[in-house]
Image (tube, rainbow, N blue to C red):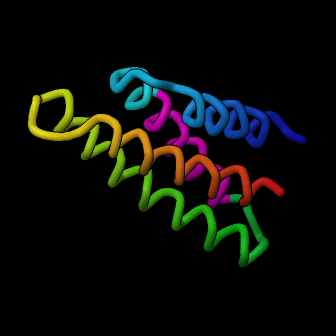
Amino acid sequence: MDELRANLYQAARSLCSTDHDQEALSVSVEADELSQQLIATESDPLALATLAWARELLVEGQQLVFEALAGNGCGTQARRVLQEAAWLLLAALL
């Protein structure tokens, strides 16, 4: 596993285990950046589609975290969406 994939794997694992909104936001931004880099080099169409889907969920989750941090949303829902994104990222790495 190359360094990019290893870093994305670690970020996805962190997203699966975090219980804090601010940490989830930070890790999701890192995971999004890493997934963009992987999309630029990936050739497998299924992995590309899975990464694109995961990125959509990362963006949605980040918006929900912002709302939760502003007191206008539920952090639990945000973390759930980010965990779904993390599972997709892990699947794309297979």
Q: Indicate left or right for 75 with 9 as reference.
A: left
Q: Where does the N terminus fall, quadrant-wise?
A: top right
Q: Indicate left or right for 83 with 70 as reference.
A: right
Q: Is the magenta stretch mostly helix, strand or loop?
A: helix
Q: Residue furthest bottom?
A: 45
At x 66%, y 69%, the residue is 48
Q: Position of residue 51 (x, y in %)?
A: 60, 62
Q: Position of residue 47 (x, y in %)?
A: 72, 67
Q: In which quarter of the image is residue 79?
A: top left
Q: Which residue lies furthest to the right in this view?
A: 1
Q: Nearer the viewer, residue 17 or 58?
A: 17
Would residue 38 be counted in the magenta stretch?
yes
Q: Where does the C terminus fall, quadrant-wise?
A: bottom right
At x 51%, y 42%, the residue is 33
Image: magenta residue range: 27-40
Q: Indicate left or right for 45 with 58 as reference.
A: right
Q: Is residue 76 above or below residue 41?
A: above
Q: Where is residue 25 in the image (x, y as percent from the top left)?
A: 38, 31
Q: Indicate left or right for 50 with 60 as reference.
A: right
Q: In this view, does 46 lie above or below 71?
A: below
Would residue 36 be counted in the magenta stretch?
yes
Q: Quadrant of residue 13?
A: top right
> How many numbered callouts?
0
At x 17%, y 40%, the residue is 73
At x 59%, y 47%, the residue is 86
Q: Where is residue 26 in the image (x, y as percent from the top left)?
A: 42, 26
